[in-house]
Image: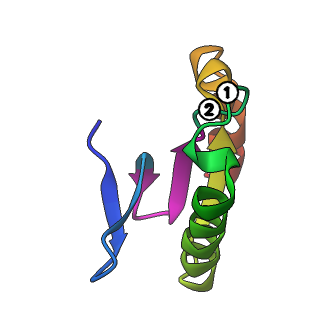
Amino acid sequence: MPEYVFAKPRRWRFDAACPLLLIAVEVEGGAFSRGRHTRGKGYVADMQKYNAAVVRGWRVLRYTPQQMDAGEFIDDVNALM
């Protein structure tokens, strides 16, 4: 599934999205290995992106790759539909 650009000109993207329902799914890699999403600059950039999404009416669900593989997102997405 291609990423979805939700805020131009910033070119912020969601890993997956349903634009009609304003539901987005983000996969947060590196949670246990000090990846980009857990270090200072990347963490702050993610907060700016997620706050901008909420201001625009999006509901953003965040998961680790392991949670995605386990299908933990399915019930949450269905609950929002």
| Closer to us: 80 or 47 | 47
Per the rendered image, the range of residues in magenta is 17-28
The spot of residue 9 in percent (x, y) is 27, 83
Q: Residue at x 31, y 64 (%)?
A: 5
Q: Amino acid at mark 2?
A: Gly
Contact flag, marks 2 and 1 (Cβ < 8 Å): yes
Position of 63 relative to 48 (above/below): above
The picture quadrant where one finds residue 40 is bottom right
**Residue at mark 2 to residue at mark 1: CA–CA distance:** 5 Å
Protein image colouring: rainbow
Q: Amino acid at mark 1?
A: Ser
Q: Secondary structure at mark 1?
A: loop
Position of 61 relative to 69 (above/below): below
Q: Residue at x 37, y 70 (%)?
A: 6
42 magenta-colored: no
Q: Which image quarter is the N terminus in?
A: top left
Can you identify the residue that label 1 sits on?
33
In this image, 41 relative to 17: left or right? right
